[in-house]
Image: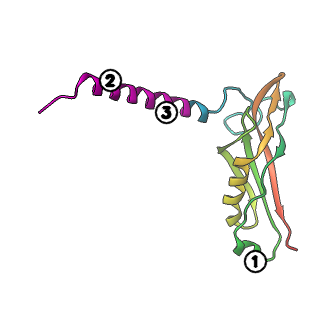
């Protein structure tokens, strides 16, 4: 059995190091920014009197399934979502409060992931905080 030469070995080492660097950079980009978490374990503001809540800036409308729209009935969903300091929604800390049709949940969550918020502020610093978001669809 022959062993790879030093040139080939060095190429593999450089390739492995490059892949590790790219993976660590991608991982760092996917991590939420560090900030003050203004919520308690129950998701409520720890000190509501010190918190300015997040504000919706903009985002896409939910892409409801055609079957849901064909029903020609009013639709509504209310969700409590955690908005991180970067203005993005943290889905694993979000919950549905009320919904007229459960098939609305997935399109609304997808729209929220692409939406941006002005983060909450506590003591003059950006803070992760919950906000209630309502989506309504009225048929034509």
Mark drawn on residue 41: none
The residue positioned 81% from the left and 33% from the top of the image is 120
Tell me how far mark 3 sits from mark 1, CA to CA: 44 Å
Distance, label 2 to label 1, CA atoms, is 61 Å
Who is closer to the viewer here, 57 or 76? Answer: 57
In which quadrant of the rendered view does residue 72 lie? bottom right
Q: Are marks 3 and 1 in contact (CB under 8 Å)?
A: no
Dot 2 corresponds to which residue? Answer: 10
- Asked where in the image residue 50 lies, by quadrant, the reply is top right
Name the spot of residue 44 as percent of width and height, x first. 75, 38
| Disc 1 secondary structure class | helix
Q: Is residue 78 above or below residue 4?
A: below
Residue 74: give x, y in percent of width and height.
Answer: 83, 70
Residue at horizontal 82%, vertical 54%? 134
* On screen, residue 140 above or below 9: below
The percent position of residue 40, horizontal first and vertical second, equals 70, 33
The residue carrying mark 3 is 23
As helix, strand or loop, the secondary structure at mark 2 comes to helix
Residue stretch in magenta: 1-27
Based on the picture, tell me whether residue 17 belongs to the magenta stretch: yes
Q: Which residue is mark 1?
A: 70
């Amino acid at each position: 059995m022959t062993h790879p030469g030093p040139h080939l070995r060095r190429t593999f080492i450089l390739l492995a190091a490059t892949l590790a660097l790219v993976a660590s950079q991608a991982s760092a980009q996917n991590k939420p920014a560090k900030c003050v978490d203004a919520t308690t374990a129950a998701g409520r503001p720890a000190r509501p009197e010190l918190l300015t809540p997040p504000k919706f800036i903009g985002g896409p409308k939910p892409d409801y399934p055609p079957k849901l729209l064909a029903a020609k009935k009013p639709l509504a969903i209310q969700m409590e979502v955690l908005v991180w300091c970067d203005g993005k929604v943290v889905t694993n800390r979000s919950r549905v409060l009320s919904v007229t049709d459960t098939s609305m949940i997935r399109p609304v969550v997808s729209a929220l992931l692409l939406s941006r918020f002005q983060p909450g502020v506590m003591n003059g610093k950006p803070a992760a905080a919950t906000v209630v978001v309502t989506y309504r669809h009225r048929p034509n």
